[in-house]
Amino acid sequence: MSVASQSLSQSQRASLSHASPEAVIDAAAGIRRYLVAGRWIGTNNVYLRAPVKVVEKEVKAGATTASNPKHLREYVAASTVLHAAEGWSYLGRALVSHAAGNADVARHLGYYAELRAAMSILATQGIGIFHRSHAVLTASSVVRLLKGFATHEMTWLALEAWATSTAGADAMTTAIRPEGSPIAGWIGSFGAAATGRPLGQSWLKEWGLDLRRFTEDRNARNEVSYRPGVRPHPATSSEDGAEFLRQFWPLFEPRESEPFGIVDRYLLRCSLDAAFAASPSNTVSFRQRIERALREQADAAASSALGGFLLRTTEPDEPLLLTYARDRATQLSPNHHMHVMSRAALLLRLSTGMVSSVLRQAEIEFDELRFWFDRVVDGHGLAAPGDAHDDPLDMWADVRDALEDLEGHIDSGGAGSYWNLGHGSASALAVLGGAERIGLWALA
């Protein structure tokens, strides 16, 4: 049964409505004493080794609240970071498969990147997804337990309920921060009809974060994961595959204090375009609205570099990632896996921003996460031993060099086949498959 044919019951919706982001922040502040010892939660945490079994055992016994709410709150708080980071890892493996011409595996991994991003978002809001029993952190010390659908179905249904709520729309428009200002402020200064909460809700479609579309991605994942490939599928050309990679990484080049500065600019421009188009009366011109938003949000003029970008006098084209995220494509499309990966990247950007907010409000510093950061960097081979441990942004240098190698190979005709692409750019592609870097430098 697809998610599209399912819906949450009134009692499930009522339980989810009690979820408290503030409870997550409090729990995150509480796990700081474990971080200094190099672990996420206490060694005596009853949810440490078999969380799903423990939660389901309580629910089967008739419990409606967790018997050890402190432990479960701490587990959910730690999961905010780890779900997001592991989502970036799935996306990286999807990019590796994509570069090898294996669209089916890229689609499969891209879907799981979407799923982990969604679970991370829900965790930041106080909703822990387990298997068929789930947890809701409330503003009191109580953690509610509820029966629900299985992991995949419950994740998308709960996220859809949250995203179309006032709290969800507010959280989304706060997490995206072009030029250091929440995008809600930009839209407010722009002065169009689609402001604040309506904007957050419209993003579900404007960004391609239409959650019903994730259901389609799941169904496509099931097809390639469990069914033999007896039907021929048109293959993505190696040139198209290389171009997607070449355009992907520059969107995530980190800036000091703005790890998502570039992709957020594009999201801002798309949102302003959509807001203007949705305005019932446009007696004030688009340029006038841009000028006001620039003045109020960035102390900049239309003649500035940012003004030229928003007015499309410079860099007018949309990157493939945004186009693919927004457009519909069936699993029979040769580029469908790139649509899935694009949606995953945007959802991960959103989840990572929300996790960063939790860490900031819990006053968790990067040094407190260094034990985990170093373990991922070294264990996943993201940097040479000793490199990138002082400043996570140093990892961009490896990506920049890899991009230059890939572009040189492409420009010399080296993307004419997946054999040529893989063998001529093997070391570059190994680096460009490490999307964990994005999550790490964004959370540092």
Image (cartoon, rainbow, N blue to C red):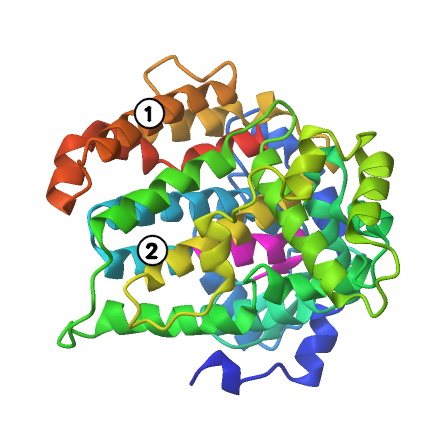
- The percent coordinates of residue 210 (x first, y second) are 56, 68
In the displayed structure image, the side of residue 260 where residue 382 appears, left or right? left
Q: Which residues are magenta?
A: 113-128
Residue drawn at point x = 31 percent, y = 72 percent: 222
Mark 2 or mark 1: whose residue is earlier in sequence: 2
Amino acid type of the residue tagged 1 in the rendering: Glu
Up-down relation of residue 154 to residue 388 (above or below): below
**Dot 1: what SS?**
helix
State the residue in front, 281 or 337: 281
- Which SS type dominates the magenta stretch? helix
Residue denoted by label 1: 404
Category of crowding for the residue at label 1, using alpha-carbon neighbours closer than 10 angstroms: few (below 14), some (14–19), many (at least 20) = some
**388 to 232, vertically: above or below:** above
Res. 15 in view: yes
Determine if residue 132 is in view.
Answer: no
- The image shows a total of numbered marks equal to 2
The crowd level at tag 2 (other Cα within 10 Å; few <14, some 14-19, many 20+) is: many
Residue bearing mark 2:
109
Quadrant of the image containing the N terminus: bottom left
